[in-house]
Amino acid sequence: MQSSQTVAIHDLTFVPLLSEQQIQTRVGELGAALLARYEGQTPLFISILSGAFVFASDLIRAYDDDCEVGFVKLASYQGTQSSGSIQTVMGLEKQLTGRHVVVVEDIVDTGRTLHFFLDLLRQQNPASICTVAFLRKPEAVEYPVAVDLVGFDIENQFVVGYGLDYEGLGRNLPGLYQLME
Ligand code: IMP
């Protein structure tokens, strides 16, 4: 799948955008920012599957203090793009009332996923909500979502790696790659 620079996945070719080292450095900074924010508390990290699982696993290890971890899997109906609805496929089992919740998302593209999930979360009365996204595409955002911490703002390009896939492949790449123009 991989040559020295480009990555071929299915019918497409991707070029490097962020190295593993750049990503790890930034994740360390995000972990430090969260540590300062939650000193003496035990936040609950909620990772949105599937794309955020790699970022979440690094982020919680950069958070060098007590924390809990949960997962939620959301899916949108096909073919409806940004106007479509999203359903929870696999829900949270943890009680969220009074908890400090850190929502971990892979990428804010239109913002629809995060917008929907934050609505759901607020209904459970957490003490606070902090949203952390590994990536954000500012030009693509259509839904009003407050993202408290962003790893990297990127152009409106399709990317793979570090948990993000193209038709099922590419999640295990340690760096980030963008579609070759
Ligand atoms: P949303 O449009 O912000 O709701 O993003 C929905 C989901 O689409 C994200 O959580 C990602 O899993 C996926 N996604 C958006 N942009 C990309 C991309 O460039 N590469 C791979 N997956 C993406």
Image: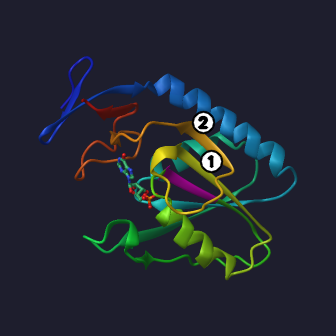
Quadrant (top left, top right, bottom left, bottom right) of the C terminus: top left
Residue under label 2: 27
Quadrant (top left, top right, bottom left, bottom right) of the N terminus: top left
Left or right? Give the position of 11 relative to 5. left
Please state the quadrant of the image where ligand 1 appears.
bottom left
**Mark 1 Cα shell of 10 Å, populated few (<14), some (14-19), many (≥20):** many
**Mark 2 Cα shell of 10 Å, populated few (<14), some (14-19), many (≥20):** many
Q: Amino acid at mark 1?
A: Ile
Where residue 36 appears, as percent x and y from the top left, is 82, 43
Residue 60: which numbered mark, if any? 1
Residue at screen point 45% across, 52% down:
109
Which residue in the rendered view is the most extreme toward the bottom?
Answer: 123
Where residue 15 appears, as percent x and y from the top left, is 29, 26
Left or right? Give the position of 88 relative to 157. right
Residue 104 within the magenta-colored segment of the rendering: yes
| Front-lying residue, 118 or 32 | 118
Q: Is residue 38 above or below residue 99?
A: above
Q: Amino acid at mark 2?
A: Val
The image quadrant that residue 59 belongs to is: top right
Q: Is residue 3 above or below residue 144?
A: above
- Is the CB of the residue bearing disc 1 within 8 angstroms of ligand 1? no
Residue at screen point 67% across, 82% down:
123
State which region is magenta.
103-107
Q: Main secondary structure of the magenta part?
A: strand
| Front-lying residue, 175 or 65 | 175
Q: How many marks?
A: 2
Q: Earlier in the sequence, mark 2 or mark 1?
A: 2
